[in-house]
Image (cartoon, rainbow, N blue to C red):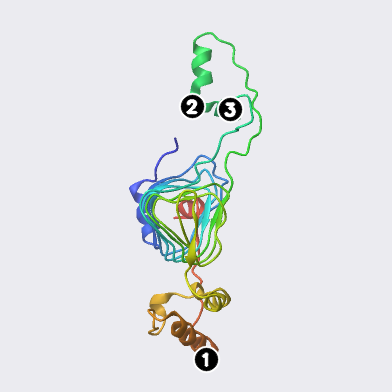
Amino acid sequence: MSPEYSPEELGALASHGVVLTRARRGAAAASPVRLEPPVHVCSETSFDFPFSVGAFSHLNGGFIQNVTIGRYCSFARDVQIGHGSHPANWLSVSPLQYVRGYRGWSDFLTSQGLPVHAHVQPFEYGRLTTIGNDVWLGNQVFVKDGVTIGDGAIVGAGSIVTKDIPPYTIVAGNPAKIVRPRFPDRLIERFLALQWWRFALPSLPALSFDDPARALDQLEALIDASLVKEYRPAPICLPDFLQQS
């Protein structure tokens, strides 16, 4: 298992708006890791796989890897994303068939005087999962590899997500099924057209957050008057950032 980051490295990241807890640096340095500040990742995360999180998102626990996550996302505790899969139609489900040197067991067999052949078969262990902007995942949500969860979606606690979820849809259950849309269709269209997450909410003039239609009106007026600018921070890309720090 790859090591966690040192206190000095975590401090350097935190000074640039990126808080990591329980993240491991990963053995595959070529895997793209993009963190858009400010962001808080408090989960068991391995950077052996592609990983991207947008600004103002907070991940509050669980196991999360091999995923692209948008801005303003709220993940509750024990969320599970990126566990990968096993071949169901091969000789075995064991990773020994497709991971060379898996868990050092081949070395052990060699030490016992047994012949070991290095041949393994290519297998797509995990597919990239995509999470949109302003998505809320409840406690103990499990997301199947390769699924896409649209902007503004809400997934109820304990749900098992096996299929793509449309934008601004509330789902729940095992398997997760549509409960209802978050808003009327016309309002959802406005959300998706405006893409309010382009902006930093704390930097905007007061909006009527509890009245979404009015808030969109207010933001549209600010945009038309050129009174707001999109939030475009320089992303933190690992491991390059730490090598330059």
> CA–CA distance between discs 3 and 2?
9 Å
Labelled pair 2, 1 in contact (Cβ < 8 Å): no
Residue placed under numbered mark 1 in the picture: 225
Q: How many numbered discs? A: 3
Q: Is residue 9 in sight in this rendering?
A: no
Residue occupying the far top of the picture: 113
Q: Is residue 151 above or below residue 76?
A: below
Front-most of residues 89 and 84: 89
Q: Which mark is residue 96?
A: none
Query: Residue 171's x, y, as percent?
Result: 47, 59
> CA–CA distance between discs 2 and 1?
60 Å
Q: Residue at x 52, y 14 (%)?
A: 109
Q: Earlier in the sequence, mark 2 or mark 1?
A: 2
Q: Residue at x 53, y 27 (%)?
A: 102
Q: Which mark is residue 100?
A: 3
- SS under mark 2: helix
Q: Which mark is residue 103?
A: 2
